[in-house]
Image: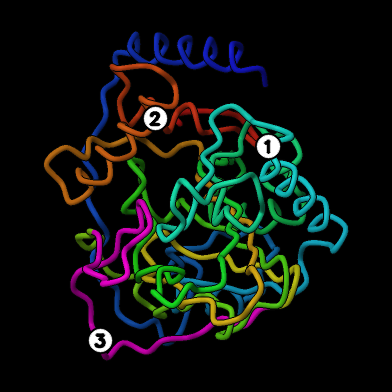
Amino acid sequence: MHPNRASARLCVLLRHLRCRSAGTVVAHHTSGVGSLASFHPQQFQYTRENNVLSLEQRKFYEENGFLVIKNLVSDADIQRFRNEFERICREEVKPFGLSVMRDVTITKSEYVPSEKLVSKVQDFQEDEELFRYCTLPEILKYVECFTGPNIMAMHTMLINKPPDSGKKTSRHPLHQDLHYFPFRPSNSIVCAWTAMEHIDRNNGCLVVLPGTHKGSLQPHDYPQWEGGVNIMFHGIQDYDKNNARVHLVMEKGDTVFFHPLLIHGSGRNKSQGFRKAISCHFADANCHYIDVEGTSQENIAKEIVNMASKMYGLNDITMKDVWTFRGRVVKGERINL
């Protein structure tokens, strides 16, 4: 989309939002739920009945908060996403609203357009080629198991985890994705995260703490890491160090679906190559926005709004405005989000 058209679209959205009479409501987080030894349909809290997931798959997600589907995205699609990412890195295309991130160890003086200097691109909703990921039928078939039939794509990323410089900045602290989202309920949100190549502990695979999706949202902030921390890499300040960890070794095309309260992160990339993955957070279009002022999310909200204000050249936007602009309906109809 041309920048002028996208800016105009944003202004129309903002006017529409401010004319609405319905305000936001404050979220109430789900308290911890005990282990479900035997499952009955009415006891499923995190999955929906649509004959896609087997009973065992539903039980696994309910208990653990994540589910890996093997070989879900084709090699051909992954190559297309890789090609588009490389075009973005070479600055051959500049989608409006896209954030191009560099590792904290890379100084401005070192920067030249290159895949080797880009650690992540996010908010690619205006890039038709990358956004195809969010509309793949094989992805949406599973997403609907968690969100229902009216699906919004809310947050998009292609991660290009670089070889670690020795300062351990390529790792991502343990966190909960809900920390970044001003919409609820959490049980109607899911992330789809697809490996674009073989991913293991050597190149920084995802690590998850099974069952932590049953808890509440924890306070997050920047970890005090000696080598530095990448922008917006907030982490949980206090969590149970004895909680079991599972490292997700994945092959190209494997996709993990996980709950936004699941505690997860990734280790440093100890290989010489770049580790790529593409992801999208989806939500039920019936979800509602909340006011995060005065909550543990206020710190990240200020960062997100400040970044968006600079990008869009607007001074009076809100957290809700930012996410309304990012969101795209990918199935069904747009309702609240």
Q: Position of residue 35 (x, y in %)?
A: 35, 83
Q: CA distance from mark 1 to mark 2?
A: 20 Å
Residue linked to disc 3: 241
Camera-near label (1 vs 3) is 1
Q: CA distance from mark 3 to mark 2?
A: 35 Å
**Circle 1: element type:** loop
Q: Are marks 3 and 2 in contact (CB under 8 Å)?
A: no
Q: Residue at x 52, y 14 (%)?
A: 7
Q: Residues within 10 Å of mark 1 (few under 14, many from 20)?
A: few
What secondary structure is the magenta-colored segment mainly? Answer: loop
User: Please, is residue 329 above or below residue 159 in the view?
Assistant: above
Task: Give coordinates of residue 274: x percent, y percent.
Answer: 64, 68
The spot of residue 18 in percent (x, y) is 33, 12
At a point 60% along the width and 60% down the height, the residue shown is: 160
Judge whether 8 appears above or below 133 on screen: above
> Element at badge 3?
loop
Q: Position of residue 194 (x, y in %)?
A: 66, 63
Q: What kind of residue is marked 2?
A: Ala
| Comes first in the chain, label 1 or label 3 | 1
The residue that mark 2 highlights is 308
Residue type, label 1 = Glu
Circles 1, 2 touching at the beta carbon (< 8 Å): no
Label placed on residue 91: 1
Magenta segment range? 222-250
Position of 32 compared to 65: left or right?
A: left
